[in-house]
Amino acid sequence: MLRYVTHRLLHFIPTALGVVTLTFLLIHLVPGDPVEVILGEQALPADRAALSQQLGLDLPLWEQYARFMMHLAQGDVGTSLFSQRPVADMLWGRLPATAELAAAALCVALLIAFPLGIWAAVNRNRWPDHMAMGVSLVGFSMPNFWMGPMLIILFALWLGWLPVSGREGWSSLVLPAVTLGTGMAAITTRLLRSALLEVLHADFIRTAKAKGVPQKGIILKHALRNALLPVITVVFLQAGALLTGAILTEAVFSWPGLGSLMIDGLNRRDYPVVQGCVMFIALTYMVMTLLSDLLYAWADPRIRFGGGGR
């Protein structure tokens, strides 16, 4: 197991370096000049040149990258071009809101996916199966930027049950959590159904039936436990992807998290803020992928002893 963990960590380091490098390069390809955004279009050329020199934006790209990597190696993500606050402080200030939204969306997804997936597998090729798969297809097909406003119109404007936006109490969390968790629920429902259908035809299930184990016990105690491995992997991956999906969802609901911080940084061409947000989201996704691999290897020894070192 230790060899497997070491092997995965050695792959993690160059991948993280690649993410950091690509983030730096791509953000500098975004059209727009942060100096012009800060000073306005009517600023004098001398003022623009002075501010550009002060921010280090007049240096060649390779030199800016070298400085960025040097500071990053010391744990300094950078300083906002606008507020002059450390980007790390801004990220940590917004992280609780995003973590709260992601956790709530994950709970919504699991509460929807497990009953639907089990119901569909038990009633294969019957109307409950078709209905569950239809619901998951609809959930998978609706993008966050469309579903969010629809929920706002229905539950906030027409019915008046929930607030339109902001982060004030649990009621303001319901709509963004449902919006963000629906897509994950659709994927998890289909995967759980497929995994259960494979397990339900296994020999140990037929043995349990022959022994007179009730249907509920067979599903929950035997089949579900053995079908959880692929589901766990996808849940971990989707948990990382929730941060990416949170960008649009937070923008729709004015949720004060990392997603809205990143969009504000893009609008202002605040390179350090955008770099910090993208790197955090990407590295979180990578960590979740690594944890899913390690958990899978712990649960199934054939993975770490199999060929290819996976």
Image (tube, rainbow, N blue to C red):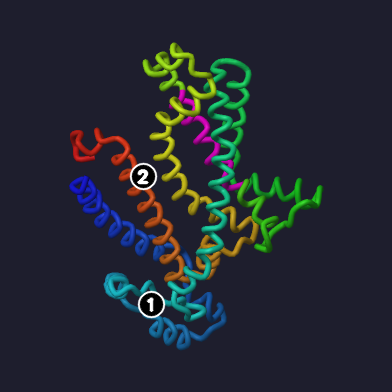
Is residue 92 one of those drawn in magenta?
no
Is residue 195 one of those drawn in magenta?
yes
| Residue pointed to by mark 1 | 57
| Residue pointed to by mark 2 | 292
Q: Residue 276 location, x and y as percent? A: 42, 66
Q: Which residues are magenta?
A: 179-196
- Residue at point 36% right, 44% down? 292
What amino acid type is highlighted by mark number 1? Leu
How far apart are the alpha carbons under marks 1 and 2?
40 Å
Q: Which mark lies nearer to you, 1 or 2?
A: 2
Q: Residue 238 location, x and y as percent? A: 46, 44
For this rendering, which residue is in front, 302 or 253?
Answer: 302
Q: Residues within 10 Å of mark 1 (few under 14, many from 20)?
A: some
For this rendering, which residue is in front, 87 or 64?
Answer: 87
Q: Quadrant where the N terminus lies?
A: top left
Position of 158 with respect to 290 (left or right) is right
- Residue at point 59% right, 64% down? 256
On screen, residue 136 above or below 242: above
Quarter occupied by residue 203: top left
- Residue at point 66% right, 51% down? 174
Marks 1 and 2, the one that precedes in the sequence: 1
- Residue at point 32% right, 77% down? 59
What amino acid type is highlighted by mark number 2? Ser
